[in-house]
Image (cartoon, rainbow, N blue to C red):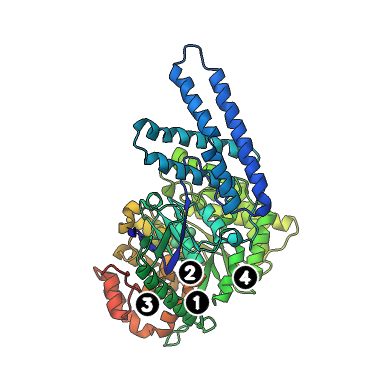
Amino acid sequence: MSFQVFGLPVSRGVAIGRAVLVASSRVDVAHYFIDDSQVGPEIERLRVARDAVANELSTLQRDLPSDAPGELSALLDVHLMLLHDETLITATKQWIQERHYNAEWALSAQLEVIARQFDDMEDDYLRERKADLEQVVERLLRAMSRGPSSTYAPAPGVSPRDFAGEDPLVLVANDIAPADMLQFKRSIFTGFITDVGGRTSHTAIVARSMDIPAVVGAREASHIIRQDDWVVIDGDNGIVVVDPSPLLLEEYRFRQRQSGLERDRLSRLRHTPAVTLDGERVELQANIELPNDAPAALEAGAVGVGLFRSEFLFMNRGGDLPGEDEQFEAYRAAVEAMKGLPVTIRTVDIGADKPLDRMSSAELRHEHALNPALGLRAIRWSLSEPGMFRQQLRAILRASALGKVRILIPMVAHLAEVRLAFEAIARAKQQLADSGRAHGIVEVGAMIEVPAAAIALPTLMRHFDFVSIGTNDLIQYTLAIDRADEAVAHLYDPWHPAVLQLVAQTISYARSTDKAVSVCGEMAGDPAFTELLLAMGLRSFSMHPSQIAAVKQRVLRADTRRLTPHLRALLESEDAEAACRELFARPVHAEAPIGLS
Ligand code: PEP
Ligand code: MG
């Protein structure tokens, strides 16, 4: 029977496909597709893990003290029985063989299936065995993480389309780690649904960068939706329709075709320069996560990379970090792909919801950091790892010999940090000079994403060549709203007067000092803000390549002489969103929800 689940619309468009569930587990699990050659080795990893756990359990049982309660031994018997149960192992192998999931993913997918069967049982005793099954699977997952690791590294361009059958697939999960999103970026999912997350959580950002529909913060979605259910993701309205009726499906297919046509129409603006009606030139740059995003940026008409989120190079590596040469190659690839256009490389923004690797994620979130968003992240983390920081700086500096490269420091708040960062840059340059390596002239900029930086801009600005406003974090820190927490997502408000004031002030002050200023947060790529930002004096925007055409269309229709006189009233307005909509007469959402009237 058809039903709907509601969440936050974070990436536009409609996706229709069969649900692929990524189960959440107490042990962090990597999720990726494998190719044919890896099916055998993955099944072997599963077998090795099962033998190891069987040994573990038998040893535990053998070594039980003689006065141990009899239930303990009976419990271990149950665990051993579950471990050897064919429903677990045979079906897990099937996920590996037929769906080409890696072993951990296959195991957690099968756990989900069996757990649901337990949930449906009438008998209390049997229903409670679900916890035992979870413990056994947890042991298996831990054994796999200790045992031979997967040798498989998905190569760029490898697509699991061949394994997935004919139907399009959408991903449903409690949460998707940024590292997993990176894997999925190369895969075939046509949409994402998560239980948790906010509009600017990194799941949402990566989904937008892939330009595929996504709904986050959909609460119970991963529990209600079942493997292989047909679902529609309405990314414009934050609605997920499960098992849609044929009529509804037809309506959504129609909308899908319409948005495809709209995209084609907008893509014709690709090579049109972004100039307002009154002749103001506007720079539309791209945000990228990996060097191989750069061709798409060029293709979309970006005039440079305004934000290269370098931390994505540090993910999916099991804790091992990329060295100087490897980083240099990545930066070089981006610089070369941009064919002479500027590339702004942000030094790693690790921490908060972008942990270094899976194990450190758990540690970072739950064991060490009381509040990760306010903890050791971004420049704070880099300064706490001086060797690694200089390594990254040397790699960036070396790439600057090959094209126009700028360094961007994330989450600047204290002058002491600024001084230390510049000392590190000076030392990195010196080390390069000492070893006879070249570097170019590099401008250094600050991300303005902490209110302290926006307020103390006159003091900070002296040290920097440019600033880039990270509105995602600026909103989070100004309003004290965790950007990844769906429980407070309704309060995460880019239109809040305090946020708009800080953005306007930063742009105005930077312009008064003749230093370059841009916005690289999600606000820059949302056409609802284009006129307002232009009225504030912004002439440089950086966004996902897929958003460039829609923003360009707004720029081409704007006349800054008509916009600027409205600025004061908009900043003082109690509802700037409604005021902007009225003044600039355009709908915020292109499409109304289907079947909800
Ligand atoms: C921001 O905070 O606006 C930003 C661009 O950085 P990130 O989203 O990567 O934190
Ligand atoms: Mg940020």
Which residue is labeled 2 in the image?
Answer: 543
Nearer to me, 288 or 592: 592
Q: Which mark is residue 283?
A: 1
Q: Dot 1: within a 10 Å radius of its alpha carbon, few (fewer than 14), some, or many (20 or more) residues?
A: many
Pick whichever of labels 4 and 3 is earlier in the sequence. 4
Residue 263 in the image: state x and y as whole percent.
Answer: 47, 77
- The CA span between labels 4 and 3 is 29 Å
- The CA span between labels 1 and 3 is 14 Å
Pick whichever of labels 1 and 2 is earlier in the sequence. 1
Above or below residue 326? Residue 512 is: below
Eye-nearest disc, 3 or 2: 2
Pick whichever of labels 4 and 2 is earlier in the sequence. 4
Residue 323 lies left or right of residue 504; in this view the side is: right
Which residue is labeled 3 in the image?
Answer: 531
Which residue is labeled 4 in the image?
Answer: 404
Above or below residue 68? Residue 584 is: below
Identified at 29% across, 65% down, the residue is 497
The quadrant of the picture occupied by the N terminus is: bottom left
Q: Can the viewer see residue 551 in this picture? A: no
Q: SS for tag 3?
A: helix
Nearer to me, 11 or 596: 596
Residue 529, located in which quarter of the rendered image?
bottom left
Pick whichever of labels 4 and 1 is earlier in the sequence. 1
Pick whichever of labels 1 and 3 is earlier in the sequence. 1
Q: SS for tag 4?
A: loop
Residue 248 in the image: state x and y as whole percent.
Answer: 35, 69
Asked if the residues shown at circle 1 and circle 3 are in contact, with their CB atoms under 8 angstroms apart, the answer is no
